[in-house]
C-alpha cells in the first residue's frame, strides 16, 4: 500500500460521494493561485467534519487555523440559520485569501475571521463571553494543540465535541523519543485527555491523499 493507492481511493470516494461544488472549488483555486500550501482537509475528511457539525446540532463553532477557508466554508455550511463560526488565522496573507473565499461562498455573515496568533486571540474571545462552542476544530500550529484543546474544553458545554487534526503525524505519535516537537505536543494532548475527567476521547488513524495521519475526537461529558 502506498500514497498513490490512498490518493486513488480518496479520489474515488470524492467522485462517488462528494458532489462537485463551485464555491469550494473556487476557494481551492484561489488558495492555490495565491500560493497557499495545499494542506486543507481532504474532501472526504471535510465531509466528515460537516457530518459531525450536523450530528452535534452545532450553532457555535470555533476553528483554529483557517488557511484559505476550505474547512471553514464546509463547517459554516453545516450550521442552521443563526449559527456562527469564529475562525482564527495567524497569517494575514492567508486570511485575506480566506476572506475572499468566505465572501464568495456567501458566508460573510456567518463567519468571523480573526487575524493573529490564536493564543493571542483567545483572551479577547473569553472577555467577550464567546461560546460555549458546540464544536471546536483544532487545525493550526500543531505545537499548540494541547493549549487550544484546554481553552476549547473550558469554553464547551456538556455534549460539545472537540476535533484535533494531524495528531498521528506519520506514526510519530507512538514514538516517545520523537525529536519532532509537534509529535511531542500530540503525546502531551493524549496525556491531558487521559487525565481529564470531563471528556471521552479517541484517536483515529487515517490514510488518504494527505498520507498517513489521524485525528482526535473528544466528547465533553461535563463542564
Ligand atoms: N483548517 C484548514 C487548514 C489549516 S492549515 C483547512 O482544513 O482548510 C493550518 C493553518 O494554521 C495555516 O493557515 C497556518 O497559517 C495557521 N496557523 C499557524 N500558526 C497559527 C497560530 N499560532 N494561530 C493561528 N493560526 C495559525
Ligand atoms: C499541515 C497542517 C495541517 O493542518 C495538515 O492537515 C497537514 C499539514 C502543515 O502545517 O504542514
Ligand atoms: Mg490539518
Image (cartoon, rainbow, N blue to C red):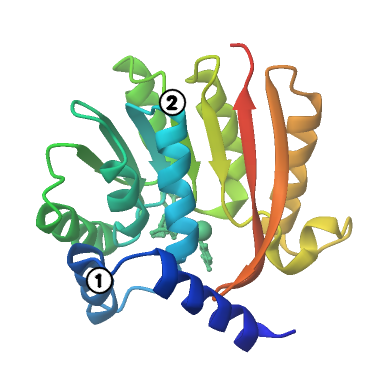
> Can residue 51 be seen by looking at this rendering?
yes
Residue 134, labelled with which disc?
A: 2
Question: In screen coordinates, is 196 left or right of 91?
Answer: right
Q: Which residue is situated farthest in the right direction here?
A: 176
Residue 138 in the image, given as x and y percentages of width and height: 50, 44
Residue 90 in the image, given as x and y percentages of width and height: 36, 52
Q: Which image quarter: residue 79? A: top left
Residue at figure coordinates x 55%, y 83% from the top left? 8
Q: Which residue is situated farthest in the top direction here?
A: 223
The 10 Å Cα crowd at callout 2, few under 14, some 14 to 19, many 20 or more, is many
Between discs 1 and 2, the one toward the N terminus: 1
> In this orientation, which residue lies closer to the viewer: 213 or 125?
213
> In this orientation, which residue lies closer to the viewer: 195 or 220?
220
Q: Which residue is situated farthest in the front direction here?
A: 16
Q: Is residue 127 above or below residue 3?
A: above
Q: Is mark 1 within 8 Å of ligand 1?
A: no
Amino acid at each position: 500500500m502506498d500514497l498513490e493507492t490512498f490518493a486513488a481511493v480518496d479520489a474515488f470516494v470524492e467522485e462517488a460521494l462528494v458532489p462537485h461544488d463551485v464555491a469550494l472549488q473556487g476557494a481551492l483555486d484561489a488558495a492555490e493561485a495565491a500560493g497557499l500550501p495545499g494542506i486543507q482537509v481532504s474532501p472526504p475528511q471535510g465531509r466528515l467534519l460537516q457530518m459531525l457539525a450536523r450530528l452535534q446540532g452545532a450553532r457555535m463553532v470555533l476553528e483554529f487555523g483557517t488557511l484559505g477557508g476550505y474547512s471553514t466554508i464546509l463547517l459554516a455550511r453545516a450550521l442552521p440559520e443563526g449559527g456562527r463560526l469564529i475562525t482564527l488565522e495567524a497569517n494575514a496573507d492567508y486570511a485575506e485569501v480566506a476572506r475572499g473565499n468566505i465572501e464568495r461562498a456567501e458566508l460573510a455573515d456567518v463567519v468571523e475571521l480573526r487575524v493573529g496568533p490564536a493564543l493571542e486571540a483567545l483572551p479577547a474571545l473569553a472577555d467577550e463571553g464567546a461560546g460555549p462552542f458546540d464544536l471546536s476544530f483544532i487545525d493550526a500550529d500543531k505545537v499548540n494543540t494541547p493549549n487550544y484543546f484546554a481553552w476549547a474544553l473550558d469554553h464547551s458545554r456538556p455534549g460539545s465535541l472537540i476535533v484535533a487534526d494531524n495528531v498521528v503525524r506519520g506514526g510519530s505519535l507512538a514514538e516517545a523519543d520523537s525529536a519532532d516537537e509537534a509529535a511531542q505536543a500530540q503525546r502531551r494532548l493524549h496525556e491531558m485527555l487521559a487525565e481529564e475527567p470531563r471528556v471521552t476521547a479517541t484517536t483515529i488513524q487515517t490514510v488518504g491523499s494527505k498520507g498517513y495521519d489521524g485525528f482526535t475526537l473528544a466528547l465533553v461529558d461535563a463542564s
